[in-house]
Image (spheres, rainbow, N blue to C red):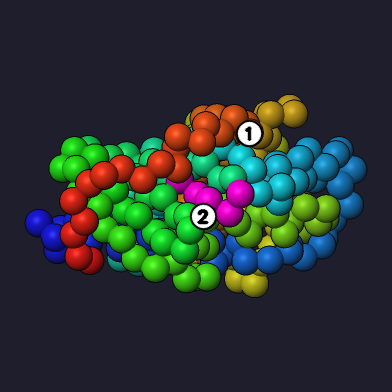
Amino acid sequence: MKKLLALIVVLVVALSFTACNLLGGPGKGGEDDDDGTGAKASVFFEMIASGTYHIKYKMLAEETESEIDLEAEIEQFVKDDMTAVIMDIGGMTIRSITRDGKVYSIFDDMEMMMVSDATEDSTSDENPFSGFGGLSGSIPSSIGTDEFNGEMLTYAEYKEDDASIFIFLRGNTLVGMRIVSGSTKIDMIILLLDQNIPDSVFDIPDYTEIGA
């Protein structure tokens, strides 16, 4: 059982780490933002840069070389250097809380949790949006339209090394993001985005602690 739980946690963290690495810093400038698409996308970046936000999204990840497809629904709360993540994946719900120098991987159904020290890397792993704040004020490398979640939508594209980050908008509404790097594509469909964060989401339960 411990090995199974550890494998799930590694999978979740590895996927978040992929997204975080692809969003590591400011995007490189490009086309003029004639229609204001980049400015609209920047509103999202500014909220992320504030360090206080609540986001819920559906994630669809594809890795064509290894033929891996993964679907998950994720809710994330960030406030005062604390992060709480709730992930539904494969019929299992996993919670993770990072605070006070520790990472708590929580399995509520079994009343168990794994605890590890929070490093700079693990903190970034828990927060795949941390790099978005660096894009605030950046000029998109391109503006265009593409299909996203069954709709043709306007996007602002930002380049970061060998990755492309697409911010999809419906009018003034942020619909989602797409990260493309090599054979990996990750779509994040926004379900909710605000700054309403109850302190209770960062509470650590009194569960049995198991080793990683």
Neighbourhood count class around disc 2 (C-alpha, 10 Å): few under 14, some 14–19, many 20 upward: many
Measuring 82% from the left and 60% from the top, which residue is drawn there? Answer: 30
Q: Give the amino acid at mark 1.
A: Gln
* Viewer-closest of 43 and 204: 204
Measuring 52% from the left and 32% from the top, which residue is drawn there? Answer: 198
Measuring 37% from the left and 50% from the top, which residue is drawn there? Answer: 96
Eyeballing the image, is 85 above or below 16?
above
Q: As drawn, which residue projects farthest toward the front?
A: 206
Q: As drawn, which residue projects farthest toward the left?
A: 1
- Left or right of 190? Residue 92 is left
Can you see residue 4? yes
> Residue 123: percent from the left, percent from the top?
49, 62
The residue wearing badge 2 is 127
> Residue 148: percent from the left, percent from the top?
55, 38
The residue wearing badge 1 is 195
Residue 73's quadrant in the figure? top left
Asked if the magenta segment contains residue 131, the reply would be: no
Which residues are drawn in magenta?
A: 80-84
Neighbourhood count class around disc 1 (C-alpha, 10 Å): few under 14, some 14–19, many 20 upward: some
Eyeballing the image, is 207 above or below 149?
below
Q: Give the amino acid at mark 2.
A: Asn
Measuring 85% from the left and 39% from the top, which residue is drawn there? Answer: 36
* Viewer-closest of 35 and 83: 83
Number of the label disc, if any, that sits on residue 89: none
Can you see residue 153? no
> Residue 100: percent from the left, percent from the top?
48, 58
Q: Earlier in the sequence, mark 2 or mark 1?
A: 2
Eyeballing the image, is 36 above or below 179?
above
Identify the secondary structure beneath mark 1: loop
Task: Kindly report the secondary structure that dominates the magenta region of the rendered protein.
Answer: strand
* Viewer-closest of 87 and 168: 87
